[in-house]
Image: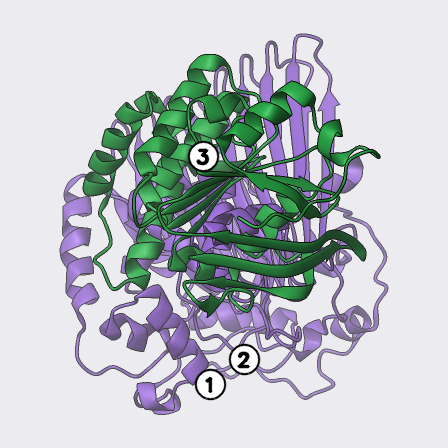
Chain colours: A green, B purple
Amino acid sequence: MLEIRGLHASVVGKEILKGVDLSVAAGEVHAIMGPNGSGKSTLAGVLAGREAFDVTAGSVTFDGKDLLPLSPEERSWAGIFLGFQYPVEIPGVTNATFLRAAVNARRKQRGEPELDAVDFLALAKRQMRLLQMDETFLHRSLNEGFSGGEKKRNEILQMALLTPRFAVLDETDSGLDIDALRVVAGGVNALRGPDRAIVLVTHYQRLLDYVVPDRVHVLSAGKIVRSGGPELAKELEAKGYGWLTGPAAKPATTKA
Amino acid sequence: MTNTTPPSVPHAPPQDDALERATTGEYRWGFVTDIASDTAARGLSEDVVRFISAKKGEPAWLLEWRLKAYRHWLTMREPTWAKVGYPKIDYQNIIYYSAPKSAGDRPKSLAEVDPELLATYEKLGIPLREREALAGVAVDAVFDSVSVATSFKDKLGSLGIVFCSFSEAVREHPDLVRRYLGSVVPTGDNFFAALNSAVFSDGSFVYVPKGVRCPMELSTYFRINAADTGQFERTLIVAEERAYVSYLEGCTAPKRDTNQLHAAVVELVALDDAEIKYSTVQNWYPGDKDGKGGIYNFVTKRGACRGRRSKISWTQVETGSAITWKYPSCILQGDDSIGEFYSVALANHFQQADTGTKMIHIGKNTRSTIVSKGISAGRGQNSYRGLVKVLAGAENARNYTQCDSLLMGDRCGAHTFPYVEVKNPTARVEHEASTSKIGEDQIFYCNQRGIRTEDAVNMIVNGFCKQVFRELPMEFAVEAQKLLAVSLEGAVG
């Protein structure tokens, strides 16, 4: 579904990604782990088409088509979703307004009729019950005054409403208490399916206790230095990143 | 502090050339008052004032009132304290009166109207019939809104409410007009108000008698007798004891207008327990995207809460005009009276807006609320200028001011000039201000969810303006949102 080949990307002239290779097939869940500054969020941003990131070399294809020339909204319409590490606040715009605009933007693009407020609310409330979110969420300004956990749950709600084919969740688990983590994991597991792929970008093994990935990759200094099965995450948890990224570690480029 | 008030300088010496010519050389052009003519000669003189008054068949007292204003105006200087810049206006190169255009001078059909104007009507969803009227097309058939307006007037009349053109009010209700005209904005209040008082053409008059609650929103849109009064408009609204009226001024559609200088005066009077809600959507021609053309809008709007527990509420959405100079104010004279000001002002391209309010607390327990939302885009310059003044006798006065600016792009400007004068220690005055920029991260977030940049900007701007929009009557609020979207087209990306 997604093929990344030799991807190099820089931010304000500084190279962050230095040749990333990754294949994700439909139906799979991958975890990308790595220490701070290893390029995890840059990779997520590049996939979503963030302008601040310059792709200097390499290719990314989605369903066999070149993803890189597409604008962020075109990628979204194609079915790519990014769960933000730091969801932005938009004062005065209610969550309901924003979510409906997002859902309808996609429906319009697909030639489907747009949802009116009543139908949308019914849909949103159903999903919110699954995520154990209070309905009052809908009437609050988008992410404004939300706690960290509420923001992350709101990202999962958006994902559930937009039913993307490929989702990258950028540290969605960070800052969550154990209950919120379960809810978020439940949302991710609910989305798993043979037509979808999910990439979890995470620091910790914790989330992976609830969402068991098919593949785990370790990103370090802009490259994937190790790939393996779910057991790799456990090993990392036990040994620390220094095991792979420290001066003693040997670079390895095992392909998934 | 004093520069918040349009300075009324009664004895300023005449200084500029135009003034010199006006005072000394009024016969240089061989000006002769020709009452049969449809148009006054270019320039301003006592004769022109007399001509206007005569054309309108006004009583002697009103002519005297105009002349007094004119003579006062001669002693005044154009204010320069606002943060706006424009070429010097030659007041002797303006035609101060011309009769409504005859059908012959107007476009015959929409095919003759500027396509860009029509495109804007299209975007705003203005019905076809109304587009013709707005574009100034000569329409032979009596179109729908006229008959609507007539039945509307009958209904109001049965309640004792007067809603008519200013000229008609002078003829039909001279005592009311004489009693209240200039009682809130005196003839010599400021340069533009004095000019308006001397040469005003027409406008609206509303009178709601004691205890009557006006059952519908009064809209200038339905006013049939006051066509072509744009340039020097005069509005007077009086709500007697326990009366209520909501008045809507303007129209979201850009009107075709060839007059560059607009200087309107609006006066509101609320007696005991009366409430006046005045909503404006101003969309005069802002000039093109290179800053050419556009209306200079120098308006004086003021409401007097004369009665106890009276309330005046101004809500404005200002998206048009090349220059906006406007401070709808409240004089809170009656004890327990309330003044409110809710404003959205947009300055895009080369537009300049210097707008805000004055809340003058005189009575005890008077309260005022100011919510100002300024949006700057392109090379637009947006200034909030507000005065909160609490006089010595205003025990327990309260004011809350919130003043937010939103910037789009890095070539525009937002400025805030809040003035506070408090002479009573029991007063409580709060001021909150914020400046934000539509961030790339906000736009990217929306884009990632499939929302196009233009729609994202509209959503963010509407969110920013929400507190003001919810003060507008429902239909007007929907139109105002659309208008903002159209006015901001191309502002980002």
Q: Which residue is at 62% across, 51% downward?
A: B440
State the separation of the CA atoms marked 1 and 3: 88 Å
Marks 3 and 2: which is nearer the front?
A: 3
Q: Amino acid at mark 3?
A: Pro
Q: Which residue is at 27% across, 46% downward?
A: B162
- Give the percent coordinates (x, y) of residue A193: 30, 42
Considering depth in this image, is B118 or B488 the residue closer to the camera? Answer: B488
- Give the percent coordinates (x, y) of residue B27: 71, 82
Asked whether disc 1 touches disc 2, contact meaning CB atoms under 8 Å apart, the reply is yes
Q: Which residue is mark 1?
A: B37
Asked whether disc 3 touches disc 2, contact meaning CB atoms under 8 Å apart, the reply is no
- Give the percent coordinates (x, y) of residue B324: 62, 57
Crowding around mark 1 (Cα neighbors within 10 Å: few <14, some 14 to 19, many 20+) is few
Marks 1 and 3: which is nearer the front?
A: 3
State the separation of the CA atoms marked 1 and 2: 7 Å
State the separation of the CA atoms marked 3 and 2: 84 Å
Q: The disc numbered 1 marks a residue on which chain?
A: B
Q: Which residue is mark 3?
A: A213
